[in-house]
Image: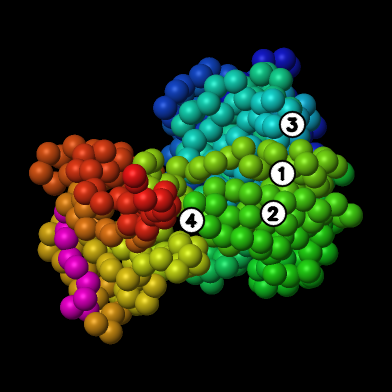
Amino acid sequence: MSRNSVAAVSLRKLFPTAQIVGADDIRCDYCLASFDEAVQDCVFAIGLDSESDAARDTIEAINCGAKAILTEQFLPSSVPQCIVPDVREAYARLCQELAGKPCEKMLTIGVVGTHGKTTAALLVSSMLKKIGNQVAYYTSLGASNGKDAGLVAHPDANADHLAQWLKSSADNQTPAAVIELSDEMLRSHAASGVEFDVVLFTGLRKSQRIDSLQARGVENAMHRIVGQLKQHGIVVFNADDARLNRWIERHQPHSISYGLDAVADVRGKRMSSMPGEQSLMLSAGNCVMPLTSLLLGDHNARHMLGAAAVGYAFGLELFEIVQGIERLRKIPGRMQRVPNSVDCPVLVDSADQADRLAVALHAMSKHGSPIVCVAEVPEAATPEQMAAYGRVLERSASRVILTQSRQSNRSGQKAMWQVLDGCEYPASIQIVPNRATAIELAIRSAEPGEQVLLAGWGANCWTNDQTKELKSDIEFATTTIANLPPRTRSVMSQVPRLRLFGGAKN
C-alpha cells in the first residue's frame, strides 16, 4: 500500500493523456493493488494480474472502500475510474509520487542484464560506500536502506515495495541507491516510476534460465529503462558482450563502455592470478592503477570493471574507485572461500546451470590445480540441459561427486541419469545423493594442492536427510574442516631443510 504523507496526488496532472470517467479529477492519498488490507477512500489498481477477473476485482474493491479505480479498460463501476494505456506502469509511477519522488533526493543506479547483476550491484555499492559512508542497495542477496542492513529483498518486489524502500533510504539521507532489477521486476514494470542517474548493463548472454524469448524481453525492458534516465543520465555497458554491443549500436544511448578483452572506455588488463586472489591493471581516461581482489574469475573481473565505469561516470578519482572495489572481499555463495581451507582451498558457488558451472570451474582451473567438484543436480532443467551440465563436469573437474537434495528419490534418480547422459565416462562420476555426506567425502579425501568446489546451492540452505536440519555449504564445510584430524605431515615439513656444516668437534 502506498500513502502520500504530504499532499494528495492529482491523477489528471500525473496522467494528462489518461481518460477519467465519472469525475473531472481524482485526488489520491492511498493506492492499493491487493485486497489484503482494506482502506477507505483509496484508489485501487485493477488489472496488474492478467489472469484475474477485472470486473469481479472492481466490485470487491468498491466493497472494500475504494473511491476510484486505476485501470486500462473501461469497467462497469459506481466510482470514478482513471483509464491508462498500461496500468502496471501507471501504478508504478503513482507509487513513486505517493512516496515523495525519492529518486530526486539521491543518486539512483539500476543494474540490468541476464547474468551477474547481484555481484555488479554489490561492487557498485561497495565503491560508493567508500566515498559517501553509506549507500542503499536492493539485491537478491539482501537489501539496505543506508541505515539498516540485512533487510529482506524480494526478486519479485512490486512497485509499492520498491517505492517504500526508496523512501526509507531517502529519509535516512542516503546519498545513493543501487537497485538490481530482476527479470520479474522488469516484466511487472515495478521500477517504471524510478528515474536513474546511471543504468549498468551487465550482458545479454543466454543461459539455462534465459532463452531467446526471455532475452528479447530483457532487451525490450532495457529500452524502457533507458527512457527512465534523468536528463544527465548515462548507460554503462559490458563491451565484451557481443549481443549487448549490437543493442547499444542500434539504440545509440549516451554511454560508457567497459571490458576485459574489447576496446573500451574503462578497461582491465589481466596481471596475475593466484589461489585466492587476482590482479588487474585498471585504466580509465588517462589514469592507470592496479586493482587486487579476492573475487576470482574473468566474470568477476568484468563486474569490477563495471563498478569502476560507474565511478568513472560520476567523476570519481581512480584511487577512490579502486579502494572502494577492493573493500568487497566476498559475496555470499559466489565463489566464496570457506574459512581455514588452507592446504585444500574449498569454494562455494551457486552454479546450478551448465554455463555458470563452466565459468566457476574455469576461474579455478587457471592455477592448474586439480578440482574436486561436489555438484547438485540442476532444478527445473530439460534433459538436454542436464546432459550439458554433465559434459561441463566431466571436462573441467578432476573428480566429480554428484548429489541431489531438491527432489524425491525417484525423480532425483532420473535427473542424475540425465546428467550422466552427457558424460563420456559416466562410471567415473561418484553418486552420493546425501549432500552432507558428499561434502564431507570431498573435503576429507582431498589431497594438499587440490581444490574443492561446492556447486549448486550457493548461500541457500539445504536439508540433511537424516536430521532434517537446514544447513548451508559454507556452514557445513567450515564445521567439517574444523573437525579434521591434524595432518601427520604438513606441506611445509616436506620441504628439504639446508644443514650448515659447523666444523668438527674437538
Q: Which of marks 2 and 4 is nearer the N terminus?
A: 4
Q: Earlier in the sequence, mark 1 or mark 2?
A: 2
Residue 231 to residue 79: above or below: below
Q: Mark 1 points at which residue?
A: 322
Q: Which of marks 2 and 3 is nearer the N terminus?
A: 3
**Frontmost residue, 492 versus 111:** 492
Residue 256 to residue 198: above or below: below
Q: How far apart are marks 3 and 4 (CA)?
A: 30 Å
In the displayed structure image, the side of residue 208 where residue 253 appears, left or right? right
Q: Is mark 2 on a helix, strand or loop?
A: helix
Q: Mark 3 points at which residue?
A: 131
> In the rendered image, is residue 44 in sight?
no
Looking at the rendered structure, which numbered label has been put on residue 275? Answer: 4
Within 10 Å of the Cα at label 3, are there few (<14), some (14-19), or many (20+) other Cα atoms? some
Q: How far apart are marks 1 and 2 (CA)?
A: 10 Å
Q: Distance between the residues labelled 3 and 1?
A: 11 Å
- Say which quarter of the image contains residue 464: top left
Q: Name the residue under label 2.
A: 305
* Residue furthest bottom in the image: 424
Within 10 Å of the Cα at label 2, are there few (<14), some (14-19), or many (20+) other Cα atoms? many
